[in-house]
Amino acid sequence: MAYSSYYRSIRLAESLYCYIWQGRGNNCNTCLFANLLRGGHPHVIVDPGHVRNEFREPCFDYLVQAMEKDGFKIEDIGLIINTHTHPDHCEAIELVVQGSGASVTLSREEHEFYDIQGKKLSTMFGVQPVELNPLFYLGEGNLSLGSQNKVNLQVLLTPGHSPGEICLYWREGKVLISGDVVFFGSIGRTDLPGGSLSLLKESVNRLAQLDVEHLVPGHSTEFGSIVSGKQNVERNFQAVKLFI
């Protein structure tokens, strides 16, 4: 399989690129908000994923190559947003920081969970824990990125899959980056440390109230990856509620 087959690049808006993982093993989808920040590091990345997964697929190397095909370089990233600290979402953070000097942000609740249980969870999956040194914490509310090419994101604390997981809602673009809370036809697992089915149900119900045209989940399923179209998104929420 050529590197380009491992990721499918989807441009949802002028500034938003989604990299959909298509390898054999586990790895998350990655989002890139391009050319927002001032200075020499203008890009914002959400969940850079694994370095190398259980099939020894070099996930991060393939992400770098897929991004470069779209004209973006790792060294130009200025901010890393982490939805949650499971290794398939955060293992490559250190490599991005090393390559770009980017700052890191996540929720305080998720960082505290990572220090207490998350590092052990990484070890359980055979992954070397990474050092997360956030510049600031994300809480409920607005996160404004950029100046001229401004993107206003609503940060939503959505526990259930992980205690401090966040989702990102871009109201103007009607895009919801849902992490591992809700997928195409499925929901995130709750049997790992820190999981809670009752909290996940509350989070899914909350997300279902948003006006969304594009649901961008943290993983693809057998049903697909991105859910596009308001009616399709609404039907997807109706379907996933059957799992809870």
Image: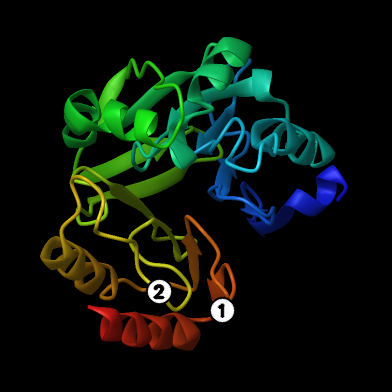
Residue 222 falls left or right of residue 24: left
x and y, in percent, of residue 5 in the image: 81, 53
Q: Within 10 angstroms of label 1, few (less than 14), some, or many (20 or more) residues?
A: few
* Residue 223: assigned label: 1
Mark 1 or 2, nearer chain start: 2
Residue at the disc numbered 2: 186
Classify mark 1: helix, strand or loop: loop
Q: Is residue 103 above or below residue 49?
A: above
Q: Which residue appears at 50% of the width and 18% of the height? A: 94
Q: Is residue 168 above or below residue 130?
A: below
Give whichever of 163, 32 is nearer the camera.
163
Q: Which residue appears at 54% of the width and 36% of the height? A: 48
Residue type, mark 2 in image: Ser
x and y, in percent, of residue 226 in the image: 56, 68
Residue 18 falls left or right of residue 1: left
Q: Within 10 angstroms of label 2, few (less than 14), some, or many (20 or more) residues?
A: many
Quarter where residue 225 is shown: bottom right
Quarter where residue 161 is shown: bottom left
Residue type, mark 1 in image: Phe
